[in-house]
Amino acid sequence: MSPIAIPPLNFTLTLPFIFLAGLVDSIAGGGGLISLPAYVAAGLPMHSALATNKFSSSCGTVFSTVRYRRAGMIDLPLALTGATLALFGSRLGSKAALLSSPVFLQKLLLVVIPLIAVLTLVKKDIGSENRSAELRKGLKFGLGALAGLLIGFWDGFFGPGTGTFLILAFTLLLKYDLVTANANAKVVNLASNLAALATFLWAGKVWFPLAVPGALFGIAGNLLGSRLVIKSGNRVVRPFVILALLLLLGRIAWDLFKT
């Protein structure tokens, strides 16, 4: 990897955004929509920015996942099923990305995301209680596997918003409350993040001078965010889900219309 030089001011200004990204990500997913542009703005080349972002976000997600697990908020067998299928879906998605353009899906999401945001905002009962026990075990695991496969495909094909989509899938399909859905989503998202990180580490793309302090700030954000979720529940998750959807909408609109 060619030498990278980042001005000290850029270096310093980047870290608060990584903290904010960790905070948002631990509550509602979508933290990469904040941290990745921050790494790029700091002066990292795109591949190094992607790799460094995966490093710091993966470290942060480990801590929030452990905290949710200790709080008894993760349905581990279901989450691991989704994680396994997400790895497979991500591989399929990355292969598909080499053969086609994500433009159709991006345009579709320009319509779908505002509808989901409005639905989440208007219907106060969405994700207000855990009704997953109403589903038969086979159906529950089948839907969890399907969600992992499809959203894993999206993660490999395009990527942004994966954590938020997982939370919505666990809420709308599997009838979990938003808090439990968020905790389960962390296991699935962590699996796909670690798989991608392994690839970046092997290729030597992680820029550790910023990745290590970024990881520390990301961990701090994740710890604070997971504490807020455990303490305040759906009351804090819902607005952050809407925020994450709006960030994703802005990212997709930018990607589509910047040229």
Image (tube, helix red, strand yellow):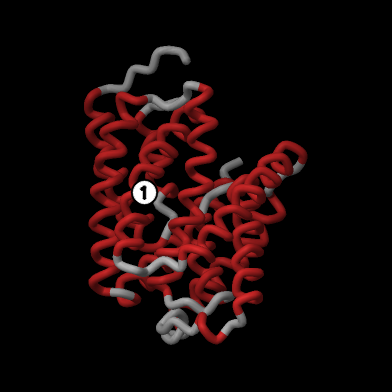
Label 1 is placed on what type of residue? Val
Total number of numbered discs in the rendering: 1
Residue hosting label 1 = 62
Pinpoint residue 142: horizontal percent, then vertical percent: 66, 69
Q: In the drawing, does residue 89 fall left or right of residue 168?
A: right
Pinpoint residue 76: horizontal percent, then vertical percent: 47, 63
Quick one: SS at disc 1? helix
Question: Which image quadrant for residue 65?
Answer: bottom left
Nearer to us in this view, 79 or 28 = 79
User: Residue furthest toward the right?
Assistant: 99
* Residue for point 30% across, 67% down: 71
Question: Which image quadrant for residue 56?
Answer: top left
Nearer to us in this view, 194 or 210 = 194
Above or below for 11 versus 76: above
Nearer to us in this view, 38 or 202 = 202
Pinpoint residue 219: horizontal percent, then vertical percent: 28, 46
Pinpoint residue 106: horizontal percent, then vertical percent: 64, 54
* Residue for point 46% across, 56% down: 187
* Residue for point 45% across, 13% down: 2
Q: Which image quarter is the C terminus in?
A: top right
Above or below for 191 versus 181: above
User: Residue furthest toward the top?
Assistant: 2
Question: Which image quadrant for residue 208?
Answer: top left
* Residue for point 72% across, 37% down: 98
Q: In the drawing, does residue 62 fall left or right of residue 158?
A: left
Q: Residues within 10 Å of mark 1 (few under 14, many from 20)?
A: some
Above or below for 48 versus 116: above
